[in-house]
Amino acid sequence: MRKPIIAGNWKMNNTIEQTNDLIKEILEIELSGDVETVLCVPYTSIQAAIELTRETGIKIGAQNLHWEKKGAYTGEISSVMLKELGTEYVIIGHSERRQYFCETDETVNMKLKAALNDGLIPIVCVGETLGQREDGIHLTLVKDQIVKAFKDIGSKDAEKTVVAYEPIWAIGTGKTATSEQANEMCGLIRKTLESLYDKGTSSVIRVQYGGSVKPDNIKELMSMEHIDGALVGGASLKASDFGRLINYKTEEANV
Ligand code: PEP
């Protein structure tokens, strides 16, 4: 049985003061314990976020890391440094990192290995552009992203990894993939993982959907067979919306 996982990706938002305010607001809401709740905050907010969420069930993640443990990589941060702070999760290969910071399937693979070696739980992002979907190459493309991301990663490590299917055309656009489109791709991701490992391994890896997830569409998305959670940008910046996402099981939604 896969535990649903909902992760907020704050991106480059919130100072330490704003982090304190937002997390305090979130903590005022009674959050479902049936859902693993993660907040991926800016590096500068990690320490404050960890202190505020200690023993609350909310886990803290980073949004990126470097694949080396240390060295001459100005401006970068390593898994060792993130672990030292108490960070538990890390997003890898978000489409904004691929688009603006030249990340490739190869660097995603190196980062995934670094995170797993140092005990961080990776959330690996894959997904196609609108053009790629319109050209009909989206399924092959995402399959290829998965194969390359998991290259030379053993099944025990793969099991710890979370995959986020994020169609680039749905991120921050208000345009959500239909639950059928999202489920089709999440199912393909699981099938690809099964072909790389085996059924047992693929059946424990959690696959999230991300792309304009909101309180009024989460319930339908989460009802789909292959969707085990959500990676959420915009709606994670508002406590009431984020609370409604975590509590989706009891949410009155347009289903
Ligand atoms: C994201 O940044 O991963 C994301 C899915 O953003 P949004 O929810 O705003 O579309």
Image (cartoon, helix red, strand yellow):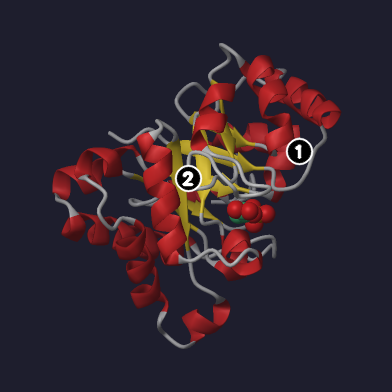
The spot of residue 214 in percent (x, y) is 64, 49
Rate crowding at label 2 as few (under 14), some (14 to 19) or many (20 or more) other CA atoms within 10 Å: some
Q: If the picture is divided into quarters, which one holds ligand 1?
A: bottom right
Q: Where's residue 2, x and y in %?
A: 32, 36
Q: Name the residue under label 1.
A: 238
In the image, what residue occupies the spot 85% across and 27% down? Answer: 17
Element marked by disc 1: loop
- Amino acid type for the residue under numbered disc 2: Glu
Residue drawn at (45%, 57%) of the image: 108
- Give the mark toward the camera: 1 or 2: 2
- Could you tell me which quadrant the N terminus lies in? top left
Asked if residue 162 shows in the view, the reply is no
Per the model, the C-alpha gap separating discs 1 and 2 is 34 Å
Q: Is mark 1 within 8 Å of ligand 1?
A: no
In the rendered structure, which amino acid carries the disc numbered 1? Lys
Q: As displayed, is residue 55 above or below residue 84?
A: above
Which is nearer the eye, 22 or 90?
90
Q: At 22% across and 45% down in the image, what residue appears?
A: 154
In this view, 63 is above or below 242: below
In the rendered view, would you say 227 is above or below 85?
Answer: below
Residue 190 lies, in percent from the top left, at: 28, 55
Q: In this view, does 147 lie to the left or right of 170?
A: left
* Label 2: which secondary element: loop
**Residue 222 appearing in the image:** yes
Residue that sits furthest to the top in the current view? 55
Question: On the image, numbered disc 2 is attached to which residue?
Answer: 68
The outermost residue toward the bottom is: 135
